[in-house]
Image: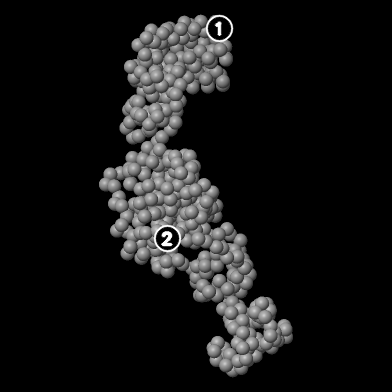
Amino acid sequence: MIEISEVLYQWQQGRSKTKIAESLGITRPTVRNYLNQATAAGLTTDSSPGEVATIALSVTAKVSGNKAAAPALAAIAVHEERIKELLEERDMTAKQIWRLLSEAGHCFSERSINRYVQQIAPATPSVTVRLEVDPGTQAQVDFGQATLTFAGVRKRLWAFVMTLSYSRHRFVRFVEHQDIATWLDCHIRAFQFFGGVPATVLLDNLKSGVVKSDLYDPTINRAYGELERFFGFVADPAKVRTPEHKGKVERSIPTVRQQLVAGRVYADLAAANEKALVWSREEIGMQPNGTTHEAPRIRFERDEKDVLKELPVHRFEMPNWKKCTVHPDHHVVFEKSYYSVPTRFVGKEVWVRGGLSLVDIFFKDAQIKTHATAYRPGTWRTDLSDYPEGKQLFLQFQPAYCRKEAYKLGEYAGQMVDEILTPHALVHLRKAQAILRLGTKYGAEKLDAVCRHLLENGSNSHSAVKRLLEKGIPQTAKVTPPPPVSNEGLELLHPALSFGEVSQ
């Protein structure tokens, strides 16, 4: 288009075909061909710039249509069916098609593949805005969907990507979940991959990182906040529904799909993640970036690696935060176990932090209680000092009431409730009350029979009581004794010696 426009312009300026050909480095017949088609389309020496541009566009279209296919394009056309099949995949690009064909042993240039793909599937260019930062000052993170193929089975996963904004060096990991534990683990792995920590991390407003989305006052997830303070970076949530604010990582997600997902089959998730590390270091990491015109890894190692913050010496302990309500029995339920708090917090919402050895309970950011971590579901961690002194006598009446009501339902129901309350009446009060509610639902006679069966088998499990009430007590096979022998039968019996001597 530019070449043809220049030919028409110089012709309007009165230059000869020979001079035009020499100035543009093309043949005189080519100049004559352009001018013949242009004059046929109405070009004159007095045509306006707008008319010349329109005529140049028309000549370009005719010239392009008349060109015979180049030998390379003709060779590529043999694989057109495969190329069209690849183009149907999401995130497929001409460059990825070139990679896949090259890996299959076909020697085509990237430019030829790109031209061929443009012919059969023209693409619309996009527009972006670039924001540059100093080395080590920012990383951008995001999750993107990726459907990987494992031995013929397609599985929907998530691709975690952290991109260093200055060097464009990136870390990629495929994961099955977007929960907080995975989110924190991916950050830790990324920092270890880079060998340091950036000053800030620009992140999307997903729940694993940000609880409340607010441009000026975001609320950071408590567990993510611990990671932030441990590694010494500042979490910087992006504005809601504004992906262009973290364009470097947003552009990385399609690149991951195009180069690590499209057309590839992996043995398992571990193999996919191993490929992602190699790709980040040796492939995309060593290809010149379109903006910096340098390989991300080279730019990273030269300018950025040494200015990142050092990794902490100690290992980060993965916390588990949960908002809980304090029940009337002074306990919160956390990870299927029970932890007591003082009376003044009954009915209030508290934050519970679970660690490897301790469970800490907070109210309005103030720590109010600490217990040893319970490793078995259903464990009670009760500090009797959490109960008010004036209420102790009242609390003691509750077990007595449960025992009395249980014996009304039956002797065995009473024995079971008595057995449940004997070790620690206050701690197991809730379980005893649940047994009584089952009696109301299924009837006293049925409950008493189930309690008898379980007590005989050494169990007082609430779940077992409920299961047998729903499904019934299993019937054991009864042994029927043989009928007595009649007198006539006895007369037919012979003594043992009548069958011969017994050898010694």
Type of the residue with mark 2: Glu
In the rendered structure, which amino acid carries the disc numbered 1?
Ser
Q: Quadrant of residue 442?
A: top right
Q: Name the residue under label 2.
A: 132
Observer-nearest residue: 1 or 416? 1
At 72% from the left and 83% from the top, the residue drawn is 41
Ranked by sequence position, the earlier of labels 2 and 1 is 2
Image quarter where the C terminus lies is top left
Q: Residue at x 48, y 45 (%)?
A: 215
Distance of label 2 from label 1 (alpha carbons): 108 Å
| Residue 323 visible from this viewpoint | yes
- Specify whether 260 is left or right of 12: left
Q: Residues within 10 Å of mark 2 (few under 14, many from 20)?
A: few
The dot on residue 495 is none
Residue at 40% over, 46% down? 235
248 lies above or below 44:
above
- Confirm whether residue 191 shows in the render: no
Looking at the image, the residue that sits furthest to the left is 313
The image position of residue 494, as x and y in percent, is 48, 12
Quadrant position of the N terminus in the picture:
bottom right
Q: Name the one closer to the observer, 282 or 494.
A: 282
63 horizontally vs 420: left or right:
right
Mark number for residue 486?
1
**Between residues 209 and 154, which one lies in front from this camera angle?**
209
